[in-house]
Image (cartoon, grey):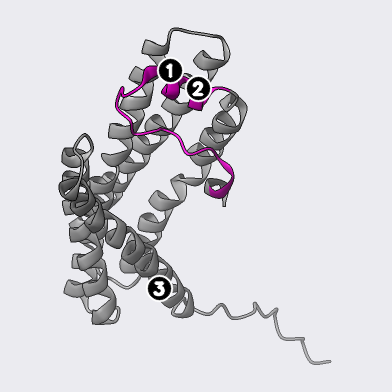
């Protein structure tokens, strides 16, 4: 929800027209800083999701080293994303204080490339989790295959998008597609997994007290 209310930063212009880049950050310090603080908390939910999947597997008697690895990969993705999101408000505060445009341009470029590095670790985590799903047969097979497809697309998309960031034309457009499709598939997979696990959770029976002693 917060994404809809923040400025479209970084600019992804990679140093082209330093004055325009600095101008884009002017007046955006508080909103971008608030958004970065918000995301630093809520993005941890991605790690919690994988931890919950691992717990469900353990409760079902199915341990998997893939899920341990998936937690680590997702934690790496969250750490990178939080750091990348901190660069835009830093640049905005510099613009607010009339800093040299070169410093703002450098932070803008760093924010652009670091954000794209988030996709591959997410993809690795999703792929590992989905592989554990398919191997265990505890969940519908279509769910595991959807996760594997989403993970593969995110990995490929993250690599290509980072390589194509500074290019123009077809290569850049083509490079952005796998990560865009993979991100959509990832969210569908994550929501579907959450719903299915919620429906299959063990039902708690109300605790009953001791039977009354007959007179």
Q: Residues within 10 Å of mark 3 (few under 14, many from 20)?
A: few
- Nearest-to-viewer mark from 3 and 1: 1
Instruction: Tell me where residue 184 appears, x and y as whole percent.
Output: 35, 63
Image check: 46 left or right of 70? right
Q: Which residue is found at the position 41% from the left and 32% from the top?
A: 10
Residue 184 seen: yes
Between discs 3 and 1, the one toward the N terminus: 1
Q: Which residue is found at the position 60% from the left and 32% from the top?
A: 31
Question: To which residue does mark 2 refer?
Answer: 23
Instruction: Tell me where residue 131 appears, x and y as whole percent.
Output: 18, 66
- From what the image shows, is residue 141 above or below residue 87? below
Image check: 30 left or right of 86? right
Label 3–label 1 contact, CB within 8 A = no
Between discs 2 and 3, the one toward the N terminus: 2
Which is nearer the eye, 136 or 33? 33
Label 2–label 3 contact, CB within 8 A = no
The stretch of residues the image draws in magenta is: 4-26
**How far, Cα to Cα, is label 3 from label 1?**
45 Å
Magenta segment includes 12: yes
């Amino acid at each position: 929800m917060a994404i809809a209310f923040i400025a479209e930063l970084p600019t992804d212009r990679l140093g082209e027209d330093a004055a325009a880049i600095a101008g884009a950050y002017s007046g955006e310090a508080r909103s971008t800083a608030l958004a970065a603080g918000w995301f630093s908390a809520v993005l941890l939910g991605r790690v919690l999701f994988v931890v919950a999947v691992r717990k469900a597997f353990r409760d079902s008697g199915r341990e998997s080293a893939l899920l341990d690895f998936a937690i680590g990969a997702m934690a790496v993705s969250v750490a990178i994303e939080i750091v990348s999101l901190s660069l835009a408000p830093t640049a905005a505060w510099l613009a607010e204080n009339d800093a040299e445009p070169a410093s703002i341009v450098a932070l803008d470029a760093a924010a652009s490339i670091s954000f794209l590095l988030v996709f591959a670790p997410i993809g690795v985590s999703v792929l590992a989790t989905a592989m554990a799903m398919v191997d265990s047969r505890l969940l519908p097979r279509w769910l595991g295959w959807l996760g594997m497809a989403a993970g593969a697309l995110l990995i490929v998309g993250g690599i290509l998008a980072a390589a194509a960031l500074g290019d123009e034309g077809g290569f850049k457009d083509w490079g952005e597609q796998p990560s865009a499709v993979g991100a959509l598939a990832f969210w569908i997979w994550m929501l579907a997994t959450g719903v299915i696990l919620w429906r299959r959770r063990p039902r708690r029976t109300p605790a009953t007290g001791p039977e009354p002693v007959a007179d």
